[in-house]
Every structure is written in C-alpha cells, then in structure tokens.
Amino acid sequence: CSSAPTDGLDRLRSLLQLCVDRHYVSPGETNADLFQRGLSCSYGPLGTELRRNLLEQWWHSVTTGRARGQVLGISTLYVSQEERAADGLRLVECEHIKQILDRQESKEEIIQEIKMLLERSPEVRTNLLTGALQQLVPSLELVNRKLPFGLAETGLCFQPSAGSGCSAEITQTSLVWFCSPRTSSQWLDHWTRQRLKWWKKFALSPSDFSSSEVPEQELEGAASRGVRILYNFPWGSETLETLWSRGNAELLHVHKGARSKLQCRDGQKSVPHVVWISGNMDRGVTAFLFNSLQQLKREEGRQKLQQRKVLKLHPVLAPVKVALNIGRGATMELRQVCGGLLQEFLEAKIFTWPGYLETVPTSAEQQIAKYDEMGVLFSVVISDNTLENGLVQVRSRDTTIRETMHISEIRKFLSRYISAAENI
Amino acid sequence: CSSAPTDGLDRLRSLLQLCVDRHYVSPGETNADLFQRGLSCSYGPLGTELRRNLLEQWWHSVTTGRARGQVLGISTLYVSQEERAADGLRLVECEHIKQILDRQESKEEIIQEIKMLLERSPEVRTNLLTGALQQLVPSLELVNRKLPFGLAETGLCFQPSAGSGCSAEITQTSLVWFCSPRTSSQWLDHWTRQRLKWWKKFALSPSDFSSSEVPEQELEGAASRGVRILYNFPWGSETLETLWSRGNAELLHVHKGARSKLQCRDGQKSVPHVVWISGNMDRGVTAFLFNSLQQLKREEGRQKLQQRKVLKLHPVLAPVKVALNIGRGATMELRQVCGGLLQEFLEAKIFTWPGYLETVPTSAEQQIAKYDEMGVLFSVVISDNTLENGLVQVRSRDTTIRETMHISEIRKFLSRYISAAENI
C-alpha cells in the first residue's frame, strides 16, 4: 500500500465522480458546477446528512462553547418588506408583471407601474447580519444588557450574480457577536482562533485550513478589520468563513440612531460593537469531502494495480456510521437479526446502512470498497456464527482491522466511539 | 386552584403577549400576524429552539420509524432553472429590470425584453414535491428498486400571495412515499394514522388534533385522495399537514414518460405511485404553543386573584429544559457552582437557562412564574446548602413539586426524563 500524489484536476474529477456515485451529490453538470463553486447544490442522501451533521456541529460549538458570554439562537425571515436597498434581489410574481405589460397603456405608464411593483416586492436576504441587528433589542433583556453575547443563525441566503447572470443560494451560518468597543479587536482574534480550531478539528489534513487577514483595500463598508478562514482547494484557496470587526455604525443605522435603546454594560455603558462571523457551509461540505478523500494504490497478487479510495470523513461528520451485512448462513434468520440491530441503531440516532437488503450479489471485497468510498465508519457482518454464539465481525474504515465483538455490545461501542471523537 | 374557560379571542391575545414577552416570537404587529396565520415569522431564541426541536422530531420519526421501507433524506434547490411554469414566483435583480426600463427603447422592445428576462429568471419553489420527484432516479439504485421507500426533506418554501399581494415563506416538511399502485390507498391510511399519532404524542390536549378526508371537489390536480391533519385553533380548524395519493402522472411527466427508468419492484414491476405528506412546521409551532398554554386562576391568601400561566410544552419540544438559579449563600461561590453545572448540561446538549446571571432582583415566586411562562421543565436552586452537602432543590414545571437531589445526579436525571418522554 502506498500513497501516490495525483495532480489537482485528476483529484477534482475523481472526487466529483465519487460524490455522484456514492450519493453525496445528485448527478448532472449544473450540479457538479455548483458543488465545485461552493454553492448549494442538490444533495443526495449522504450529502444531505453530511451537511446536517456539519450544521449541527457548528450550532453546538457556537451556542455551547461559551466564550464568557451567552449565545442565543434566532431565526429571521428570508424575505424582508422593510429596509430595502434600491437594487437587490426581489421576488416577483410573473403574472403581476405580465398583467402590467398586457394593459395596452403608454410606455411611460408601463415603466412607472413596473417600478412601483418592484418597490413593493419583497427583497431576498443575501446574508444573516441585518436580521440579527434588527433582533438585538428584544434579546438585550434576556442577557441583562451585559456584554459580550451573541446571536446565532443558520439559513439560506442568496448570492447576487455579480454580472454572471447566474445567482445562487448558499447555506450560511452567522454569529453576530456584540462586545464592548475596546475589546472588539481581541474578540476578533479570539473567534479566529476558535473557528480555525473548529475547522481543523474535523480535518484529515488540518494544514489545508488556514486563516488570513483581509488586506485593508479589500475591507468592505463598515468593516475595520477582517480575517478569512481559507481552504486550499486543488485550484487555489477559497473562503469558508469570514470574520469582520464592524464597529457599531450599521447597528445604529438599523435602529435609527436610538443610542439609549442599545446601551449595554461591560464595565462601562456603551453601544456594543459588532464582530460578525459568517460561514458558507456548502463550501464547508465540499472542503471536507476534498480533505477526506484518500487515494491509495496497492499491488495485488498477480501484478494487478488497484486503486482504493477512502473517504475518511471525521466520525461525527461521516453520514453513515455503520453498515449491516450478512455473511454465510440462513439468509432469512440473518436478515431478521439485522433488522433488529437496524432498529436499535436508528433509535439511538446512529445512521445505519441496511446493506443486508441488497439483492445484487457482490463479493465482500467489493462491498468493503464501496463502503470505504461512502465513508462508512464501520461495517458489521452477521453470519451463522452470530446465531450460534452471538459474535459478529466489525471492520473499521480507518484501521481496516476486523474485530470480533458480541452483538449486544456494538451499539454501545459505536456510541462511545462517536462521542469520544466529538469530545477530543 | 381552578381551571377557568376563557374565550378564543382572549386566549389568542394572551398567547401572543406571552410569546413576545417570553422570546418565542419577535415583537411587532407584522410578526404577530405571520405567527397567527401559521407562516414563518421572526422567531426569538425560544421559538427558534422550539422549531428546531419540532423539525428534529419530525426528521427522526420519518427517517427511523421505518414503515417496512427505507426513508432517505435529500436536499434540493430552493430556486430552479428548469421545469418552470409560465406563472409562478421569480427572483429578479432590480438593476436588470431598471436597465431595460432606462434604455429609451420602444414600448414593444421593452415588453419583449422584460418578458425574456422573466423567462430567464430562476423560479422559487412553492413546495418540496417536484424536487423529490426529480431525485427519484439516482435514489432507486440505493434502495435496489424495491418498493416501498421514501424521500424526506425539510426546507423553506414560498407561498404565492393568491391575490392578497403578500406572499410568504413557510418551513415545510415533505415525505414523498413511493409504493406499488395497488397499495397506495393503504399507505395513505397508514401514514394518516402515523402522522396523527405523531402530532398527538406531543400534545397537552390531543383532542385538538384531528384528521379529515379532503372532499372530492377540493382535490387538486393529480390527487385522487387526500387527508388533512387539522388543529382546532380558537378561530377554527387549520391544516397542519396534508397527505395526498397522487398516482404516477406527475412522476412520469417530470421524467418525460421514461417508464423503464422508473420501474420498481414490489411483487411485480411497476412505475411507483406517489403518496405525498407535506407539513407546515411554522403552523406546527403555533399549534403546539396554543395547545400547551394553561391558564390557571388561583386565590391567594388575602382574596387576591392571581392568574398563573404555564406553557406545558412536551419535554422534547420545550426549548429550555432547565434553569439554574442561586438561593441564599455566598453569591460568588454559588455562581461558580452554577457555571460548572451549566457547562456540564450544555455539553450533554441540554438547553439550560443561566438564571443565576440575572442582575435584576426578583422574588423566587416571580422567577418561577416567569419560568412557567417560558415552559422551562425544571428549575434548580443552588444555595449554601449545596456548598455544605451537595444537595440542590429541583422544581418541576408540571407537578410544581420541589425535590431535593444530589448535585451529581441532576444531569442524568434530566437526560433520563427527556428521553423517557421521547420514547413513550
């Protein structure tokens, strides 16, 4: 077994194929393109679960990893009737525009009416910051006006096309952190360390994740400082998450300058400053899939060169934790045993693959190769041995070692393995 | 203590006020209106957590409550470039329309260009059915073309305004169930029972949830039968979830009649029929809040009539499971003990309220009244007694009984209490 370097394009093609074959990403070129660009694509069952796991981990780390202050979850609206910019993305009903166009009025009237319709149409959010700033006042009471504290949200956002004509959706995470003016730069550093640590925690090769200060000329609007968390894709670095120190100008603007409403305490009274941490979890999915793909070449008996691909996703991210298969023995009985285990695992919220239901005959080797490509953590084989003495074979994706275990112990073993990996 | 009947409007006003005061729903009239109509509104921290819990329960029950067939999760796109209807909701960039309007062209050219722009603009989904039908083919391999099986998804959908000029977003759940043609009506009945059981499971008064066959004249498009799951709000019944038996016409249409691609097995070969179960989880949140609000009048010592409100949300739905407070004793030390417990609970994913951080002095009575309105399951008081012998006082929302417990046992007690309630 030896690890062989492959060039970037090969790696990309290989990963895309694997993601489609193994139901992370739905087939189709548009979809592959979206996936590659770190945008929401249509995910298959495994990709859906991977993104769910990633979002769950983000939520847990941000809302419970209490950096001296409480973090509250909120949920704001996707479209807004207030605070609309003159440009931006609007939701319009086709029929309404068509009615105007069909009205046989003068050109001026048509232009006027369409402009009015646009003004009335709801605007689609492009990020989660404004919503959180609007939510600040009701949340202040909950935290006794004491800084620092944060408002967390995950949700769909829209990315304007920027001229390409092809706008797209993104699953964003957002932590808006309110702190005293004099500490905002320290908090930016604190959160940069925390976030980078979080990304690296789930990585197979952590060195592909890095952080980089945003150059002054690239700072947008209110931001006085910014840091990007990057992933080193085969074609270059892309941003997974950005951290901005944004002062309090936007907050005051949203609340029309009502300083007294916004006063908080942290030693002294002040209108809080905002540190905003915004992540793209679709690109996060792409990054972790790239990061975890291991391609191994190994020479088999008769000089046959075989390539083995393993998706070594972190145990808490891996969508399928365990697969259940049957070996030699009475099929009907073995399936019944599998059915019982499946129910037990699912109730313990362990995502389980019912390999024993497969009807196409495959060799044990082929099955293992498939599970490795799916990133399945463990595969369990139930055989006539199990019926006799309760013993099953458990094979680990990461060590490739097969162990014998009693059937009554597997669920506990799996739960412990996953939660140990989570708490490291 | 006596339960008093209050009329519907009173009840509505009372609940709305409580939801805003206790951070389920953000303040504002628009928001209250959205909430009441069962649409997505801006949720406060408690409402956000309640909806998260509800969605999590739905996902768990549907993907693991295995009704003889596998259920796979998918995630499709919010906007679609394909399969667009002539009408529908489109996302347009204001600037593009304005550019056309400003071009000084003839009326005919303007009309032509706006129509073309609309045609090119992405359409926003109004439900999760089409996405699932498109995803069928790649999923067939995973389930060995064996019926029945299902595709589950939760996500944001858009509801057209239907003339009111005010379209809105909804958090939908969708289970698209593929089964053999001859069994589809039985499956509709099966899922109706399952879904009604699920709704009632979390209810304080289960009789407010009911199911009702859709009258023939109200069947839309492809549906040959339909059932609605209703909640009896003070102003009348509203639909929480609908179950449709839809045949396979839509499926064949989406796949352009390619029957061979869609063939599945269940005894004999056939193009599967579709049973579609679609829920509105925003209205679900409203329903459970209404359902769990208990208003009790009690007479106090000197003829003072006090009203006590308790939000008796089901233990798995209740956003805050436990609140930590300090009683008599050395504040600094007691806070430290609370901090330790808080960390322990949060790591065990028990949503905990840090009541000990509050700075406004309130009586123990007032605090309990507040927690009851928040629906907090248990409140724990740490006092100098705890420092001496490790004993804490635990008060239950539902029994109002105060028990003494050792500090080392609370986490386990809470975890067990919640999971017992989940598995009933």
Image (cartoon, coloured by chain):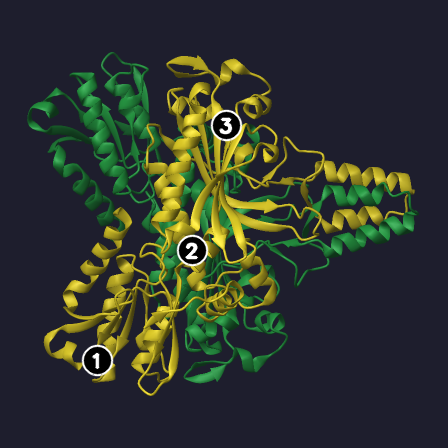
Chain colours: A green, B yellow
| Chain where mark 2 sits | B
Vertical position of residue A262 compared to residue A416: above or below? below
Q: Inspect the image, locate mark 3, and give the three-letter code of the amino acid beneath it.
A: Pro
Mark found first going from the N terminus, 2 or 1: 2
Residue B94 spot, x, y in % from top left: 73, 51
Question: Looking at the image, can residue A53 be seen?
Answer: no
Q: Can residue A142 be seen here? A: yes
Mark 3 and mark 2 on one chain: no
Tell which of A7 and B156 is nearer to you. B156
Give the number of the mark in front: 1 or 3. Answer: 1
The CA distance from mark 3 to mark 2 is 39 Å
- Label 3 element class: loop
Q: Are marks 2 and 1 on the same chain?
A: yes
Q: Position of residue B52 (x, y in %)?
A: 41, 53
Identify the subunit bearing mark 1: B
Up-down relation of residue B297 to residue B289 (above or below): below
The residue tagged 3 is: A27
The residue at the point 21 percent across, 33 percent down is: A341
Distance from disc 2 to disc 1, alpha carbons, whole Å, reads 39 Å
Would you name the residue on which mark 1 appears?
A: B333
Q: Which numbered disc, 3 or 2, marks the residue closer to the eye?
A: 2
Q: Image point 25% across, 20% down: which residue?
A: A365
Q: How many marks?
A: 3
Q: Secondary structure at mark 2?
A: helix
Residue kind at label 1, given as amino acid type? Glu
Q: Which residue is mark 2?
A: B288
Question: Who's the residue at 57% across and 71% down the image?
Answer: A251
Q: Position of residue B230 (x, y in %)?
A: 48, 46
Viewer-proximal residue, B93 or A245? B93
